Amino acid sequence: MKTKTKARRKRDKYDEAVEYLTKYPDSISHAWKSPTGCDAGCLFQFVESRPGLCGCLSQIRAGRWDAETPQLTAAIRADGRIPVEPEDITVNHLPVFAEWQRKIDRILKRK
């Protein structure tokens, strides 16, 4: 009897960022502070489709900023897996950031 297997997702920039920061965890802080200035920073880009007044996942979770939509803001604030303070981000959190960035890309139609 054949069982269905879930199709593997193609590796993306978020996989590469997780891999890099897992190998170089001391770079997490720099990537968080510079989401557009380094490749691994893509995990920490702001939750918006175009530059504006939105925050990153940690800032939104902490209640300091909003996401582009009220629905995203509420969902992010409800996700206890997202650290509130950037200095609390560890390699164990990186897959959560990647998961969210992929979801945000789909919802906001980001490239």
Image: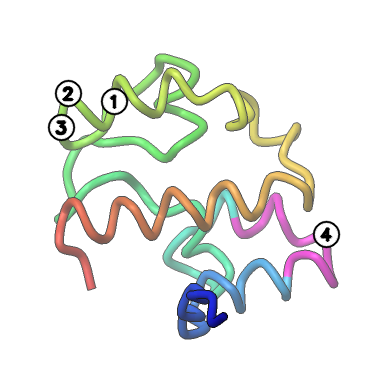
**Residue 106 % position (x, y):** 23, 59
Residue 19 drawn above or below residue 83: below
3D distance between C-alphas at marks 2 and 3: 4 Å
3D distance between C-alphas at marks 1 and 4: 27 Å
Front in this rendered view, residue 107 or 33:
107
Front in this rendered view, residue 15 or 56:
15
**Residue 17 % position (x, y):** 61, 71
Asked if marks 2 and 3 touch (Cβ < 8 Å), the reply is yes
Q: Amino acid at mark 1?
A: Thr
Q: Which residues are magenta?
A: 21-31
Q: Amino acid at mark 4?
A: Pro
Disc 2 on helix, strand or loop? Answer: helix
| Residue 73: mark | 1
Asked if marks 3 and 1 touch (Cβ < 8 Å), the reply is yes
Residue 88 drawn above or below residue 3: above
Magenta region includes residue 47 = no
